Image (spheres, rainbow, N blue to C red):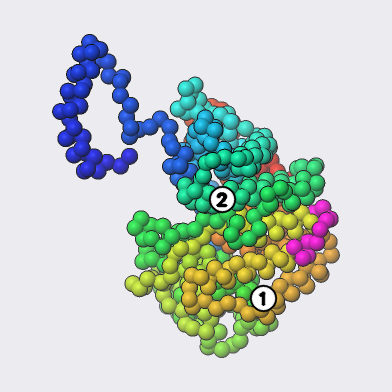
Amino acid sequence: MKLTTTHIKGWVGGLSLAVLISFSSCEKKNNLFDLDINVDPNNPTQGSVRLLLPEAERNLVGFLAGLRNTQMGMLGQISSSDSYGFGANSFYGSWSNFYTSSGKDIDEIIKAATAAGNKPFLGVAQALKAYGFSCMVDLFGTVPFAEAFAGNAETQNINPKFQAGKDIYDACYKLLDDAIANLTAASPVSIGSADILYAGDKTKWVRFANSVKLRMLITSRRVNTSAASQIQAALNPTGGLINGTSTDFTFNYGRQISPELRHPWYTSAYLASQDFNYIEVDFMFRMLLSKDPRWPFYFRRQNTRILDQNNATDRGATPVQGAYLVLEPSAWQQGIAAGVLARTKADTQYLAGFFGRYRGDQSGVPQDQDYRTAPGVYPAAGLYDDRSKAPTLLRSPVNQGRGDGIFPMLTSWMIKFWQAESELAYNFGTPRATAEAAVREHINYVANFGLSRDPNSKAPTALEITTYVNKFLADYDAAPTNEAKMNRVLFQAWIAGWGNGFEMYNALRRTGYPSNLRAPITLYSQFALRLPIPATEGALNPSAPSPLPVYFTEPVFWDVVKFKF
């Protein structure tokens, strides 16, 4: 509880009455020191599920969003953690965040809703718990589960046992089945506005629970001998899957400044304190060469000036290892061959705006904020990049963009990519058509979002979309095997994963695809097969694994690929 002057005045004003009541009670009890008689309404022992649910949802989103940049960096999209130099406690904050906020709140909702027979809230909390813990397993491999959150229980346990990832997955499947049963049971309880993600719509929560189950089955399919049949059944569950924008599991940021509710990418790239990471140049350039219609929605250039290599200051700010494309002959050759660049002043200024780094670049960070390519209108609700107009600096006193972006966690197009992968893996369905639908849906999703946030956005033409999709389909058809086709599909999923990180981090570890990602310039370790369990947890909890797993050599339970550069 936050103290205010109103509270303090209230307490002071009520002091004499409190004293009288206290002495009156003492006379009756004849024991001046028997003070265990009051219940403090400001410190309840159990929270209301209606108050806990929005905080649990917000905190779970915060936990996941806090790791988004790390995973996208490991995937070669931005320069965060792209050389895998993790310390022993690099993820202590994320670990603690889950166990002391979102995970704890969800656990309290389950206890309270179970005691009250409140099935709708119980179902939502069970679905969130399964999603949260399956993500924890995907990230850390082995974590406390059954004995977690008992630090203040009647039988206290401050050293919860770590459980195997597969066992936690099995428990999460049971949680999801129970969640669906509770969400479909008759109940007079309305969730309503307490739910900030689905506004209390139980049918959408059933779709979410079914989609989480499919996600887990896809993720762990390489170590599941029954995966083919189970995935096919999970693709057509009772109650359905997430199947469109209205059912997508996304978090919507706001436009409010105080308190700050805007997308973190927006606040770090568009405000005066600008400190957004570099965007990986290879990621941007590949999208340009393929004439990807999402490019101007993803990225926003800031500058057209070419840094003078005869000037020491400019030279010190120039991206190294060929990442400053405007000065690279090979970049011009590729761009001209692809029909996206010409040797004109306008295109020279355009290419100068591609200001980022190649992954693993550990050189110093100069004062180059006004040159860096920034996140665009999708998903951060920044600005659209109109190639026909000169870009403006983002650190302007004039507010630019809105910031009411989104965090796409589980979406319809993700499910289509998973379906295409499984159709190729197990020879059923129509993977080509499924993959095409995924790509088209995501392009339209990005464009529609951009058009709704920045009035200067321009919708890609039907010809532009079809040209891009046909090029993908030609590459798909040319692939000689289903595995090679899967590689093409997951490259498209990698492009579509901008703003998420989680699903492609899983896909790369699960399959080794896409296999054509650029290797980091510098590697402090090999590819991170998991995140390191915080050394603090290992030191303070005798139930933790000893020694703790090594993050770049010991994979999570479902990873049989053990990807390496």
- In the rendered view of the protein, which quadrant contains the C terminus? bottom right
**SS state under label 2:** loop
Kind of residue indicated by mark 1: Ile
Residue 261 visible here: yes
Q: Nearer the viewer, residue 378 or 475?
A: 378
Instruction: Report x, y in % for residue 96.
Output: 48, 40
Q: Which residue is mark 1?
A: 465
Instruction: Tell me the number on the disc at residue 201.
Output: 2
Q: Is residue 410 above or below residue 314?
A: above
Of callouts 1 and 2, the N-terminal one: 2
Figure quadrant of the N terminus: top left
Q: Residue at x 30, y 20 (%)?
A: 37
Magenta highlight: main SS: helix
Which of these two is toward me, 149 or 357? 149
Tell me the CA gap for discs 1 and 2: 34 Å
Residue 564 among those drawn in magenta: no
Disc number placed over residue 106 in the picture, else none: none
**Image side of residue 334 versus residue 263, left or right:** right
Name which residue lies at 61% across and 50% down. Answer: 203
